[in-house]
Image: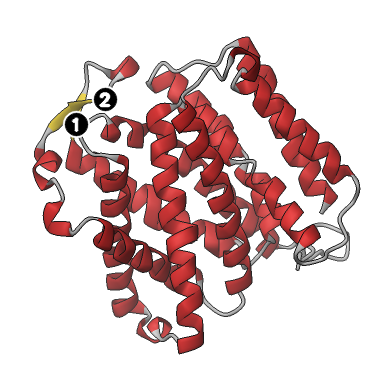
Amino acid sequence: MVDAPTLLPEGRPDDRTRLGYAMVATAATLFAVNGSVSKVVLESGLSSLELAQIRATCAALGLLAFLVVFARPKLRVGRRELLFLAAFGVVGVALVQWLYFVAIHNLPVGVALLIEFTAPLFVALFARFVYKERIRRRIWVAVILCIAGLGVVVEVWAGVAFSTVGVTAALGGAFALTAYLLMAERERRHRDPVSLSFYGFLFAAILWAFVQPLWKFPWDVLGETVSLQGNLSEQSAPVWLLVGFIIVIGTMITFSLLTGALRHISATRASIVATLEPVIATVIAWIWLGETFGATQLIGGAIVLAGIFVAQSAR
């Protein structure tokens, strides 16, 4: 299931492999910025579900417009593929986004992402027990490191120092992100990243439309102006502009970059590079929102990241 990187005669990765790594790194950086933007929007009056709904709906419309103008044939889909795309949209897109918003609304951005990014560990375990891939024994070292590190991050000995709702949502997001990576890796051989992203957002939007009809959406909130909070509290911006950033930069571009990268490198390798996101997001949240990690969280975070890297090498 895992593609080895294409090498030049000297043993160096070729341009397509480098492109894949660059795409994931760019997506991780944009996602990291998007975390702080999303947290500001969630304080404006929009709920986690409402933000997930408008994000998915507008992203689907934007990608549809792009495909209709530039790549209409790529919209074709067979009946057999339709069920897979529906599952991809509900689990890999809708749940990932919603659980992420719930997590960052109740936790510091860095803590939420650190928990969610244990997904690569679950990717490796899934490959071992479901795909029956040969996985090195060090995977069990990775499991121990991740569990121990997360225990230190949330200070489990003190009865969990952070919101139980936030921690649970972040863990749920980790499982949903695992599904996203595995499903995108499977589908990358049959469908281009833009149309795959479109169908993912389309079915996510359909799900949220059933949960909450669009006519009940609080559109008036988008016209309000809100403080950027934290160290930028004296600055303000209209909610619609912040939501627009989330939709275009933090969704359409980033998801297309991530799914596109999986055409050049495997989900396992993409997951390694994607671990840049919690690190960059923590720095941005510290500079912008004033969120800080204590010494305990820094140590625990380092242990979790070590566990994630060990999990990748085990596959």
Q: Is residue 231 above or below residue 141?
A: above
Instruction: Please say if the residues under marks 2 and 1 sit with CB atoms less than 8 Å apart.
Output: yes
Q: Residues within 10 Å of mark 1 (few under 14, many from 20)?
A: few
What separation in Å lies between label 2 and label 1 (alpha carbons)?
7 Å
- Using the image, tell me which numbered label, if any, was put on residue 228: 2
Q: Position of residue 50 (x, y in %)?
A: 26, 47
Residue 175 or residue 3, whichever sits in front? 175
Determine which quarter of the picture holds residue 15.
bottom right
Residue 188 visible to an observer of this rendering? no
Q: Residue at x 22, y 55 (%)?
A: 212
Q: Residue at x 85, y 37 (%)?
A: 141
Q: Amino acid at mark 1?
A: Ala
**Residue tagged by mark 1?**
237
Q: Residue at x 60, y 12 (%)?
A: 158
Give the quadrant of the N terminus.
bottom right
Residue 169 or residue 313, whichever sits in front? 169
Q: Amino acid at mark 2?
A: Leu
Q: Is residue 172 above or below residue 153?
A: below
Q: Residues within 10 Å of mark 2 (few under 14, many from 20)?
A: many
Q: Is residue 16 left or right of residue 130?
A: left
Residue furthest out toward the front: 159
Determine which quarter of the picture holds residue 263.
bottom right
Q: Position of residue 187 (x, y in %)?
A: 58, 73
Q: Going from the N terminus, do you reach mark 2 or mark 1 first?
A: 2
Determine which quarter of the picture holds residue 306.
top right
